[in-house]
Amino acid sequence: MRTRLLPLLIVLMAAVLLALGIPLAVSLAAARQQEVVVDRIDDTARFAALAQFVTESPTRSRTDDTSGDGRRETLQRELEQYHSVYGIKAGVFYRDDNRWPMANAPVGWNVPESGEGKDAFDEALLGRRPHDPEQVWPWQRGRLVVASPVIRDGDVVAVVVTDSPTGQMRSKILRGWLIIGAGEIAAMLLALGAALRLTGWVLKPVRVLDTTTHAIASGRLKSRVAVASGPPELRRLARSFNEMADNVEDVLEQQRAFVADASHQLRNPLAALLLRIDLLALELPEGNEEIASVRTEGKRLAQVLDDLLDLALAEHAESDLRLTDVGELAAERVASWSPLAEDKGVTLVGTCPATTAWVDPVALSSALDAVIDNALKFTPAGERVEVAVAPNGPDCTIVVTDGGPGLSDDELERVGDRFWRSTAHQNIKGSGLGLSISRALIAAGGGSIAYAHHQPHGLKVTVTVPRNRPQN
């Protein structure tokens, strides 16, 4: 969930920062250019004031000074000093068609014939004050042209034009943008850190809840959710989950206690009943079929009660997990069941290399006994029952295969259920609880048991136990 939530927050934060940063960058560029434009307007206004009193005719030689006070030379000198100091081209041009220069620096520079310079000159001829020129961006190498009219007696007699390089202005804009970019990156990193903390704080109770749910589903019913941190809604959900888990555990405990108590309490009356049947049998003719049938059903009922008690204990007992050599344990169980297999004419073989895993040795031994017993029970004489132990990545598998009749696909889905027995095997001794006990014992240690077809016929039972210590 965090991997899906974080990108969404990052995209939203980036959009907000861009929405703030782009207008700020544009505003900065406009402010820097406006500073230059205002400065140039002041300069052109000063030169226009000097040019108001120059009365030289545009048709006369520039070396003549009919004004008699040297005003044109003063203007020319000011323009040359201005160009020398700032590197800005400047000139005052008459409004005639030839745009004759009153004074200019450098000498020979004239009004551009096209572009923004011509447009600014034409607007100044109409008596209009300088306006903001088109924005110059850092990647552009344009120049900044500002024109101001020279007005005498209400008429425009000349135009002052300045043509400025934009390199310094573009450098200032770029430096400002770099500062804004660094601020945006710092804000993004800060927001990312805050998002990581926020998502971690919000999702931590969810992760704990997920882990606890998995633990309970795996059989560790005493697992509970810690409700120390997180949003109030999730803390309330955690408390509700713990209450639900407590109620479920209480119900299951009541069921286990009922099964254990019922099976235990019924054994004494059943034992007394079987004893009375034996006493009655002494007064009947030997070989009476009804008495034999009653005895058989009584013994079967006693076996069912014993298996119910074993199942209740298996589901209730805590696993004592230890690092155990599963191969050695399986080999011991094969050796223990070999005499019974020989009596039935079944070949019982084991391939049990040394493989360690975290299991409860007693529980695994009991589970393997139930599985091997079931395999021998349904395997006819002359067939084989094989027990194979092998490591499988993080797990260890114990595969028990038999040469019996096997089960159908529908029956495979039900095998292991309590009291379930195949309709084809109803005449074989058993209570239908053996594999259920095995599943409970294996699940208590964090393992699992699965059933599949064995080719060409028979049943394949795979017991899987963890090689690494399960997390509590």
Image (cartoon, rainbow, N blue to C red):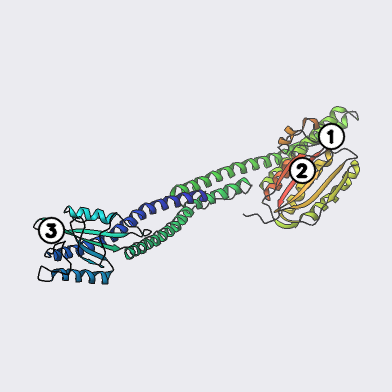
Reading the chain from its start, which is encountered first: label 1 or label 2? 1
The amino acid pointed to by label 1 is Asp
Residue furthest to the left? 153
Reading the chain from its start, which is encountered first: label 1 or label 3? 3
Q: Quadrant of residue 262?
A: top right
Q: In front: mark 2 or mark 3?
A: 3
Residue 295, horizontal then vertical, whole percent: 82, 33
Q: Quadrant of residue 285?
A: top right
Mark 2 is surrounded, within 10 Å at the Cα level, by few (under 14), some (14 to 19) or many (20 or more) other residues, namely many
Q: Quadrant of residue 173?
A: bottom left
Distance between mark 2 and mark 3 Cα atoms: 108 Å
The amino acid pointed to by label 3 is Ile
Residue 306 in view in this figure: no
Which disc number belongs to residue 278? 1
* Side of 82 relative to 426 (left or right): left
Q: In front: mark 1 or mark 2?
A: 2
The amino acid pointed to by label 2 is Val
Distance between mark 1 and mark 2 Cα atoms: 40 Å
Mark 3 element type: strand
* Side of 378 relative to 319 (left or right): right
> Would you name the residue on which mark 3 appears?
151
Residue 207, horizontal then vertical, whole percent: 54, 51
Q: Is residue 465 above or below residue 105?
A: above
Tag count: 3
Which disc number belongs to residue 343? none
Q: Is residue 170 above or below residue 389?
A: below
Q: Image point 25% across, 61% down: which residue?
A: 110
The quarter of the picture where the C terminus appears is bottom right
> Would you name the residue on which mark 2 appears?
461
Reading the chain from its start, which is encountered first: label 2 or label 3? 3
